[in-house]
Image (cartoon, rainbow, N blue to C red):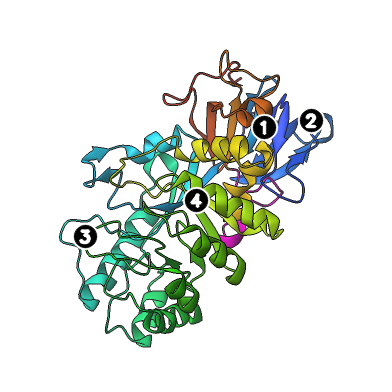
Amino acid sequence: MSENQNKLVIRNIGLILSGMLEKPILDGDAIVSVDGKIAGIGREAELDTDNAVVVDAKGTTVAPGLIDSHVHPVIGDYTPRQQQVSWIDSCLHGGVTTMISAGEVHLPGRPKDIVGLKALAIASQRWYENFRPSGVKVHAGAPVIEEGMEEEDFKQLSEAGVTLLGEVGLGSVKVGDTAKQMVAWARKYGIQSTIHTGGPSIPGSGLIDKDVVLEADADIIGHINGGHTALPDDQIVCLCEQCQRGIELVHNGNERSALLALRTAKELDQMERVILGTDSPAGSGVQPLGILRMIAMLSSLGDVSAETAFCLATGNTARMRELDCGLIEEGRSADFIIIDQAQHAPGKTILESIEQGNLPGVGMTIIDGVIRSERSRNTPPATILPERI
């Protein structure tokens, strides 16, 4: 029988990171996917591995593909913010297989009238649904809400396939009561919301403090560590304690504030609320390794294990964003990264190396059971590379 191109087997796995806080490491040495979905996890001898594309992990680590919870795409794999092409492909080489738009705000001449902003959101949703740069799943079409929008506008957006709001506060809606009403309308029609937190980030945005965030009650406290400028410490702690929504930490924010929010969530025993993003492209540029850097930073300075930090960038986001990826469990999308300790990096194991602040090397990315890239051109070289056989 010929090789089944719709079936993938990853064998000789040394370590499986699940993305699940409740059980971040799984027992097993093989994973099988069929038609883009995970069909089996465990010991190779106990799985159906016949007639498949085979990847030999050679004792390296398999983790869920990383999810960037906060990006600002525009169109295709191009961003005018930094005049850069193939930035999404570069992020794939940093292990990111899924991206969530927090608003297509960097489009020159972005429409701010209600008809125009709805048209842009619907178009953005469509073109990333129809075109996946390098296979990366980009969930886009996130309108920035403006004064004058009514419930019917959110209903129309939902009926057209829009499931996200751009950052509340990047448009003319900057007061809590107006934001609260629009967030509620969005939620009524199945549209998830994120609120800008901290000082201004782009022309037209403004300070969004804890009082506005608490009153608006958006689903995600967007970049609680600032994008770029963070709120005072007491306001960050207050948001963690008084709001039960998602706590998003981003690369393009204040690292000290990110560690404060992480410690607060840990003290509250609410680590499931913490998710990771980059908030790029932005003035700081594009960060292809931004999510990996957040994992290394949080696990080396935030007193969490490396396997837990991976959960913040995968399973936590998947569960909060209601995605079918981000977790290694049967029935989920077969989105993986195969990684290993970087060459000559200190640490006895890959997890210990990451906990010392070192990035791993990405040897392969797989999306929907299809190999999308092999040796990363952006991470430090992995000690051992997987091989398709």
Number of the label disc, if any, that sits on residue 257? 4
Between 311 and 198, the one nearer to me in the picture: 198
In the rendered structure, which amino acid carries the disc numbered 2?
Glu
Q: Residue at 36%, 49% (x, y): give it.
A: 131
- What's the distance in space between the residues labelled 1 and 4, CA to CA? 41 Å
The residue furthest bottom is 151
**Residue 77: where, in percent of width, then height?**
30, 43
Look at discs 1 and 4 and give the one toward the viewer: 4
Judged left or right of residue 168, residue 67 is right
**Pointer 3 with pointer 4, Cβ within 8 A:** no
- Please name which of the two marks, 3 or 2, marks the residue nearer to the observer: 3
Whether tag 1 and tag 2 are in contact, CB under 8 A, the answer is: yes
Magenta segment, prevailing SS (helix, strand or loop): loop
Q: Name the amino acid type tagged 3.
A: Pro
Q: Is residue 322 magenta?
A: yes
Total count of labels: 4
Q: Which residue is mark 2?
A: 44
Residue placed most toward the observer, 136 or 222: 222
Toward which corner of the image does residue 128 lie, by quadrant? bottom left
x, y (%) of residue 343?
56, 15
